[in-house]
Amino acid sequence: MASLTIRKLDDAIKSHLRLRSASNGRSVEEEVRVILRDYCEGRPATAAPAPTAAPAQSERPTAPQAVHGEARVTLIIGGGIAAYKALDLIRRLKERHIDVRCVLTRAAQQFVTPLAASALSHQRVHTDLFDAGSEFDAGHIRLARECDLIVVAPATADLMAKMAQGHADDLASAILLATNRPILLAPAMNPLMWNNAATRRNVLQLRRDGVAMTGPNAGEMAEAGEAGVGRMSEPTEIAAAAIDMLRPPKPRPLAGKHVLITAGPTHEPIDPVRYIANRSSGKQGFAIAAAAQAAGADVTLVSGPVGLRDPAGVTVIRVESARDMLDQVEAALPADIAIFAAAVADWRVASEGAQKLKKTTAGMPQLALVENPDILATISRLKDERPPLVIGFAAETEHLIDNAKAKIARKGCDWILANDVSPATGVMGGDRNTVHLLTRKGKDIDVDSWPVMTKEQVADKLVAAIAKALEESS
Ligand code: C5P
């Protein structure tokens, strides 16, 4: 049977085929096969769809589905010393069952060879915008669209500048301009280039355009004696970021809800250098803040003094004393859900010494204590701004459930998470927790006992319970 060479077809037919295949996201050969199959099966020929403008980058799908069950990545390797790590990235992506098609810029080929990228990816490697073997069917459009994600590693200062400006004078930049797929950049450059005002502007522009980035990390540079921010993320980090972007979007059951959380201990001053404190680490409250944020909530975390990093995307307000904590909680209202995980000191000294208390021969100082405001009870009893769901904690060392039940009534909250904090449990400051969720149902209180879990798992389970309750109440 005679073979058909698309290149030899009439120019008008070729241009029609190019337009049609690009619009359908197929290669010209695939498009011809579809047309012939439709003809043989008696289906009416479909007209070439009108070319549609690529959506703005901010409209890009953030988590596309892999096609045919296997995710496909177009990996653009830029020209920098970190290009050698891109070869390892190919392996990391492939061991995660991701199909990788590589594009090497001209500069990248000074650092790694197309042969190495091809051997690792098991695919033809693309280097040239005007490659007759691939451009006869608009190869750059296929590389831009026949994938679920475009990864640029290393993303050089020059490549990022071109992207920010919309240049398309080589294969890599043409793909990046022609795509409607999400883009992940792994920047790598000298720290002075990264901090240069021009790069800062380009980074800002690219972020506004919806381009995701991983790194750069801080560390030593290839240039002898230089260190700073500019090292490309490690291949495993880039692969993890790519996997995150390839996953279907996570459900966001708390989207549109303001969640207010307290965490950590409070410090109650005795004098300018001493204070009353407790052993709370803040880990459980911080984990709940992170879980609520991941579930789409707008989260305000009012925390006493702890050594934990702010969870990403959470508004964190650091306070010292119970009174400061109450002030900040009240200022953060209104909230849809309030979770009081802080171990607030019950008492403070009646009058704080203006100067450091001195040892005297007259004997020990007598510290008179007064009660601190009960933040949970105060917020639970608000008339106008009471959050619809108020959750407290009951940290007990004996009669856990009975004490927790009494606490729901005494404080006026809706739910309580009760946990045994006897020293033998290691809960205070530890990473695990065994909790019981008590929920008020009219006059009754349901008790749901959870198995021992990490504090992150407790946080996820609590957020899931909140999401379920919201769904049931709507
Ligand atoms: O009374 P108790 O300290 O056991 O109550 C624990 C619960 O009350 C926790 O949710 C804690 O955050 C909250 N609480 C508070 N203000 C206080 C004392 C406790 O919000 N002054």
Image (cartoon, rainbow, N blue to C red):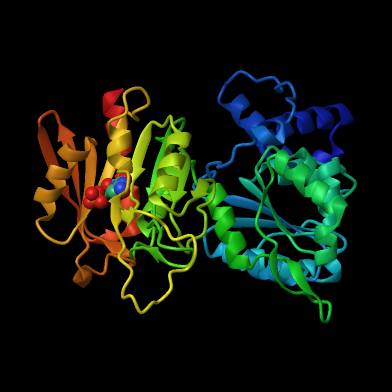
Residue at the (79%, 40%) spot, across then down: 177
Is 289 above or below relative to 106? above
Q: Position of residue 370 (x, y in %)?
A: 29, 51
Q: 455 or 251: which is nearer to us?
A: 455
Q: Is residue 294 visible?
A: no
- Image position of 450 (left or right of 335): left
If the image is split into quadrants, where does the C terminus sit?
A: top left
Q: Position of residue 425 (x, y in %)?
A: 21, 68
Q: Position of residue 87 (x, y in %)?
A: 69, 69
If the image is split into quadrants, where does the N terminus sit?
A: top right
Residue 230's image quarter?
A: bottom right
Residue at the (52%, 42%) spot, across then down: 65
Is 87 above or below relative to 152? below
Residue at the (39%, 59%) spot, across then down: 283
- Image position of 250 (left or right of 473): right
Q: 455 or 65: which is nearer to us?
A: 455
Residue at the (38%, 63%) spot, across then down: 281
Residue 77's image quarter?
A: bottom right
Residue 227's image quarter?
A: bottom right
Q: 309 or 4: which is nearer to us?
A: 309
User: In the orientation shown, which residue stands out farthest toward the bottom?
Assistant: 224
